[in-house]
Image (cartoon, coloured by chain):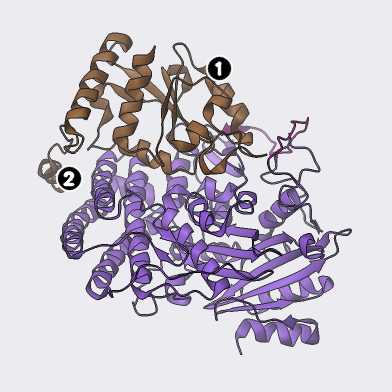
Amino acid sequence: MSILRNAITSSLGMDAEFKEGNYPASVDFCVVPRGKFVDAAKAMKKVHALLAAEWATDETLFGRGFGVFACYRWGSEYLIVKIELPADDPIFPTITNKFVPAYRFERQIKSLMGVVPVGLPDSRPWIKFEDWPEDAWPLRKSFDALKKMPRVEGTYKWIRAEGEGVYEIPVGPVHAGIIEPGHFRFQAVGEDIINLEERLGYVHKGIEKRFESLSWQDGSRLAGRVSGDTTVAHSLAYCMAHESMTGCRPPQRAQWLRALFLERERIANHLGDIGAVCNDAAFALMLYQMMRLKETLLRTNHKLFGHRFIMDKIIPGGVLADMDQDGKESMLSEMERLAEEFERLVVIYDENSSLEDRVRDTGILIPEKARELCVVGIVARASGLNLDCRTQNPFPPYDLIKVNVPVFIYGDVNARVYVRIKEVRESIRIIREILRSLPSGELTSKIEMPSPDTSGFAAVEGWRGEIIYWLQSGPKGEVNRCMVRDPSSVNWLGLEQAIHGNIVPDFPLCNKSFNQSYSGHDL
Amino acid sequence: MIKILRQIFRTGIVTEPLPPEEGAVISEVGTKLEEAIRRRFMRSLTIRQVDAGSCNGCELEIHAVNNPIYNCERFGIHFTASPRFADMLLVTGPVSRNMEIALRRTYNATPPPKLVVAAGDCGCNGGIFGETYASLGGIDKVIPVDAYIPGCPPTPVALLNGILRAIGNK
């Protein structure tokens, strides 16, 4: 028996009804009475589990009401706790008092599904802007996604700070660089930031609702556009969740190629980020050098797989791109060149004292806070949390590849850069290993339609961190709900906390070292 | 410091004359672009990029246009931080409902000639996001567009080409 399952059983006893789902073996699923939702959270907190996601479903098509799900993670285990709510009384007790990140998830559940968390300390909407009609709950089945929404009057209540010398700096949504839109509001005294409040939702495109109108096949294309820089990992997570529902097992060669794409995406983005962090500390050389290396990777992607970001090459049941012996050799020599050039640049990064002065001790997210906020990915690993789905929930072929996970405890900008540096090295090694042992065979397996009212789950370590997809099929086997949890959904909270006590000019640096996705968060 | 200098000299200038595969087309585009920018914009075309709701795929390629290999500055193209200094808005989409007002405001803050280029399939017609409660579709549903650059995302070469088309149009 697993630790999480044990904890729930010993705390709730017969109230927790465990069910078999079409989930991977590491995922347990149970239904508890509405009144026991907080008790379940308490039990999870007791065994030091982290909250991975919280979401709601509209199950009226099955003649039921709403469902609220909380997904917890501990080590290699996931546990999904569900409560069922009647359609005419869609309220549930908040778990924010136990798990801080639930605060954003629950605001989102309330805003988009109209299911109300009782006792949530912050009742402001999230993603739903003040000019939306109050009863617009897009994720409900009764909501017509194609109908335009009127704009209504409304205001958003910002957190205020008062006192002598306190002033506010509003930034965005249109930022100064080539980046995505979002609003940041700083309260500062002199140069010192006393508070940062984020407001996101500007790029909300109705992705989760859109999934419900697409076929299962087209879903992988949409997943590939949840966050363009993570196109491989998102489409992979979607496809794996879909495959878990149908029992489909992609051919071995496809699984290895998927890992190859994933690692190439990781290297490309890490290179870009390392360069961009240095650029924000006015060290432009590094940006241009890294961009140069990144461009060579993208060109190889285009040459071998037909797309610079390997978009739309992962489909349910397999992959659409292959490589031959020539491609293998050219990639091996590419990795050799890359490794050599990269190491040279790392030395320059290490030895530049004025750069060091900017990146060290800046934007610290201490391990205690990182754990409290349940952050994932690079951000977590730079703050002492050893989290990586590739080692903890190894999906094939990672069950055969050993991944060394770098963990730092300082939690500053430098630590986040260094996690990336070490991961680039590791990914180069993994790519070499994949190329050595790439099995031959088919690229796709046949995939069936899921049967009605089943659900699927997948967690994939993208370059930012753990991406979770949870899918549910409707009465006709169509997509009833697709829940997307990008790492950004939790990691944005980390930025707000890391910025305390820093100076305003260091914000771009901190922000870049997090580099969270706006699109992946807003959906 | 010596390592930095050595790296700089070792790298040399990596800017490509123009990507060999599109060779003929692009050298033509590049020359025309430079020529048009010289004639119409006093050698300097200033672009403000606006993400009106994209998935950030297009942004990656717009970054690439600025990398040392494509090096758009050699044609006189410069990305600015403020719409007040911009000759052109390079907008990626679809326009999300939550960004509509910000996009209109950015457009209003831009001085003439206010060229607008819609980049990416979503910017052209809403792409896979379509027209829904949250997505208004292509950029031209909100502000007038001078040129369209399809592609998901458009390659750096396609972006340069599209920018040229926009200057040529007016």
How many badges with numbers are in the image?
Answer: 2
Q: Secondary structure at mark 1?
A: helix
Mark linked to residue A503: none
Mark 1 → mark 2, Cα distance in angstroms: 44 Å
Q: Residue drawn at (49%, 37%), measured in percent from left and top?
A: B122
Q: Residue drawn at (15%, 41%), measured in percent from left and top?
A: B8
Q: Residue drawn at (56%, 72%), measured in percent from left and top?
A: A246
Give how far across and how far down residue A297 sits, in percent.
Answer: 26, 52
Give how far across and how far down residue A50 sits, in percent.
Answer: 60, 70
Q: Is residue A436 left or right of residue A147?
A: left
Mark linked to residue B108: 1
What color does chain A have in the rendering?
Answer: purple
Please state the extent of the stretch shown in magenta in the rendering: A146-172
Give how far across and how far down residue A185 sits, in percent.
Answer: 60, 38
Q: In the image, is residue B98 part of the stretch drawn in magenta?
A: no
Q: Is residue A374 left or right of residue A408?
A: right
Give how far across and how far down residue A411 sits, in percent.
Answer: 46, 60
Mark linked to residue B4: 2
Looking at this view, is A157 or A415 the one in front? A157
Type of the residue with mark 1: Asn
- The C terminus of chain B: image quadrant: top left
- The N terminus of chain B: image quadrant: top left
**In the rendered view, would you say B2 is above or below A371?**
above
